[in-house]
Amino acid sequence: MKDFIVSIDLSGERFKVIYRLKGIEKEARAKAEDICVEQTIEFPAELVKGGDIRDHILGRIESFQPMGPNCWEAAISYAVEITGFELTQLVNVMFGNFSLKPGVRVERMELPGSLLKHFKGPRLGVPGVRDLLGVPGRPLFCTALKPMGLSGKELAELAYRFARGGVDMIKDDHGLADQPFAPFKERVQRCAEAVERANRETGKKCLYVPNLSAPADQILEKSLFAKKNGAGALMVAPGLVGLDTLRMLADDDRIALPIISHPAFQGTFSANPDNGVSHYAIFGQLPRLAGADASIFPNYGGRFSFSIEDCQSIARAAAVPMHHIKPMFSAPGGGMSLERIPEMIKIYGRDVIFLIGGALHKLGTDLVENCRRYMEAVNR
Amino acid sequence: MKDFIVSIDLSGERFKVIYRLKGIEKEARAKAEDICVEQTIEFPAELVKGGDIRDHILGRIESFQPMGPNCWEAAISYAVEITGFELTQLVNVMFGNFSLKPGVRVERMELPGSLLKHFKGPRLGVPGVRDLLGVPGRPLFCTALKPMGLSGKELAELAYRFARGGVDMIKDDHGLADQPFAPFKERVQRCAEAVERANRETGKKCLYVPNLSAPADQILEKSLFAKKNGAGALMVAPGLVGLDTLRMLADDDRIALPIISHPAFQGTFSANPDNGVSHYAIFGQLPRLAGADASIFPNYGGRFSFSIEDCQSIARAAAVPMHHIKPMFSAPGGGMSLERIPEMIKIYGRDVIFLIGGALHKLGTDLVENCRRYMEAVNR
């Protein structure tokens, strides 16, 4: 052990993380070499004299190429075993310590079947959610219960009108938690009941999607409560509760509901091209790997700042072949209007959930009618 | 409900979030107004005609002042009730959606007693950890078990030597998870036993600190296992497992161990002054509020990029009076050497845990002796 020449039983299987590096070639190369150490042994490389740690545990630069002026892309591979086949440690190897260093961004991961087989991914994915709703080909339409401050009873009344208007999903606004003015359990019961009542009247299937960004010691129990009381899917913000908590809920056979990922508190990751994690990875690849059936993100051209290319990259990550991992829906929100729907279908394709919140109220005071008009637009 | 003129029973107590805004005055003011809406009702403000939602649920600009060229600071207050008195939702109100918009950074929060009373904060804090160790006034000294790739047996042998050298704490490297070459349970048992054996021989109290960045459905059980098998504290990375998971472990009376927060995957938050969350808040205020007894962060002048001012701001957040919430230790790591210890005591004060990993091995091949030399330096 003195020289760390130890023998480790490894499969030889490796996964890759693609990093974007800033700087002149020499600096960028030094950063890539630093990543190999910092993300694995975090130890003076010169003290590791040989053996399996240096040969297999240390990260390995598989490629290094220019991407533009002072911009490089390095593919670094790691032994699959160092993830322990856990999502928490996979994210840690990907960017744990290096998030603390400047000039490096994660673009994406390339994960072999030997690693992916430890992840279930979306339980339903695009085909499963379509089957559940009985909607084969068109985009889906989701609206939100808001504003914060309404009581559970008032939110349920809104939910009823939306469901009567024929929308596919009605989600809690992501700011609805367990506040005294609309406590979680009462709200979930009332809203699920209201949507169920409307479904009986319309003959359609609309899902009520409560927000589950609850405390760590309550989130499983609250999810089971929601399931038992008629929730049709769950919304979870991995930035607030942890990405692996989303995975836990997605994997739990007692819940067995679609999971919708919300981007709250994750925007900083992709805010700057010189540090962080790409839109593709943070809003696409990672929630899909964790088991999200849909990933919400800010739509281009709305009140947020994502570009068309950013949004398309997320849609790509949602759909790209990934061994047994099912595709998920893209769910752009913000800045939606009736007029923009045809253009958005061109950008996102049809495996998309359009999220329309405040804008739905702007169309007029008859919410049922507003929903019908949007449903007609997505049905075209 | 039609006009959202509803009556809500609120205490009138508010908390403040201090945001740094970029742009000319008009833009920055518009951003501040946007924050008031986006972080609360997320709804067209013109549709909220009056009543308690507009008057109390909506965020309120309490102050707005210039901080430099094209740089402004706004204090925005929110009703304490909209947090539901939960950490997940407090973080969501602080910066959930606005993390997705450019040009805004969270500087800090100002939390009244009416909100803080719902949080326990550090179980032991600085005085409690000092009592536990029997070390009243000097800086503490912690080293790490590495490199990744060693077996549990080999790591335990290292732990034994470090403990014989008299260090205060020995933590797992943050890359040690539950890998096949050093499975969690075996590693924890072996390392705790080795440290306990050394403690019997030296008569000192050294704590073994396993890394608990485990899957969401295993972390509580693994924490209890660690406690039962002699762990002296737990290390948790909120960026990997969720900040509220750290709180859950800190609050659990069955665990009742010091909690050490690790910054893995959180660096992006403070990487850019134009977006994200300040060093003060992300590595100081938030982990302390969640219950961390110590917060690890990259030391200035080392292999990371934090400035002296960044590091001092974290130390300030660790110690500043905060109602009943106890102070926590600052735990800078990286770039440490024997020679720098006096300077670092000047910068951080004595309520500090010096983290020394790889550098300890560079001092010579006799690890016990290396530890003794560092302990002499902090004892001076």
Image (cartoon, coloured by chain):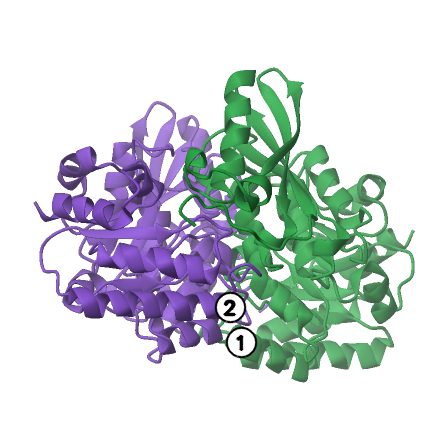
Chain colours: A green, B purple
Nearest to N terminus: mark 2 or mark 1:
2
Q: Secondary structure under badge 1?
A: helix
Task: For the residues labelled 2 and 1, say whether their Cβ atoms are less than 8 Å apart.
Answer: yes
The answer to whether residue A213 shows anywhere in this view is yes
Location of residue B328 in the rendering, given as x and y in whole percent from the top left corner: 24, 57
Front residue of A261 and A205: A261
Q: Residue at x 62, y 44 (%)?
A: A78
Q: In screen coordinates, is B162 left or right of A377? A: left
Q: Secondary structure under badge 2?
A: loop
Crowd band around label 2 with a 10 angstrom C-alpha radius: few (<14), some (14–19), many (20+): many
Q: Is residue B320 above or below residue A259?
A: above
Q: Give me the chain letter of mark 1.
A: A
Residue A215 is tagged as: none
Q: Using the numbered discs, state the Cα–Cα distance from disc 2 to disc 1 in whole angstroms.
A: 6 Å
Q: Which residue is mark 2?
A: A177
The answer to whether residue B108 shows anywhere in this view is no
